[in-house]
Image (spheres, grey):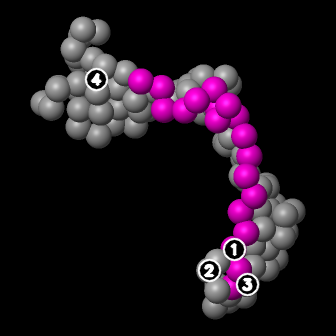
Amino acid sequence: DFSGSTVSLRLKEASFNLDHRRVIVPTETTFAVKVQHSVVNMMFEGTTQCEIAWDFQGSSPILQTTLPGQTPSQASHEDRQQVPLLIKDLCQGRLNLEVSSVGG
């Protein structure tokens, strides 16, 4: 029984790189999961209801790209393009997740 469990994460600084692309996560971003109800047996059968929350502190994660063969951290400002990934309203939010024993 995991009911009532919580986990939270605060990122001081984070970025993810894949070849000529990079995602920069805003400073002090927080993620949290609060388990409302969860009962799972030894066969991993059961139900889970939880709340997932995030707060990007009013800023969107940024996607940066460069030409293939370069990396965003090494490219000059002129050779790097960037765009926010989220609209302002999605920079903070929460959603409920419900998983039944049949996976739905």
Q: Residue at x 40, y 29 (%)?
A: 63
- In this rendering, the count of numbered labels is 4
Pick the front one: 77 or 90: 90
Q: CA distance from mark 3 to mark 1?
A: 8 Å
Instruction: Please name the amino acid that badge 3 sits on.
Output: Gly
Which numbered marker is on residue 99? 1
Residues at badges 3 and 4 in contact (C-beta under 8 Å)? no
Instruction: Name above or below for residue 60 compared with residue 99.
Output: above
Residue 53: horizontal and vertical position, in percent? 72, 45
Magenta stretch encompasses residue 90: yes
Magenta stretch encompasses residue 81: no
Which numbered marker is on residue 46? 3
Residues at badges 3 and 2 in contact (C-beta under 8 Å)? no
Q: Which residue has dot 4 on it? A: 72
Residue 34: horizontal and vertical position, in percent? 79, 56
Left or right, 63 with respect to 3, comes to: left
> How crowded is the residue under tag 3: few (<14 C-alpha within 10 Å), some, or many (20+)?
some
Instruction: Please name the amino acid that badge 4 sits on.
Output: Pro
Does dot 3 land on a helix, a strand or a loop? strand
Whether residue 52 is visible to the viewer of this picture, yes or no, is: yes
Residue 15: horizontal and vertical position, in percent? 44, 32
Q: Which residue has dot 2 on it? A: 103
Task: For marks 4 and 2, give the one nearer the viewer.
Answer: 2
Nearest to N terminus: mark 3 or mark 1: 3
Residues at badges 1 and 2 in contact (C-beta under 8 Å)? yes
Whether residue 56 is visible to the viewer of this picture, yes or no, is: no
Pick the front one: 104 or 68: 104
Query: Where does the magenta region start and end?
Result: 83-101
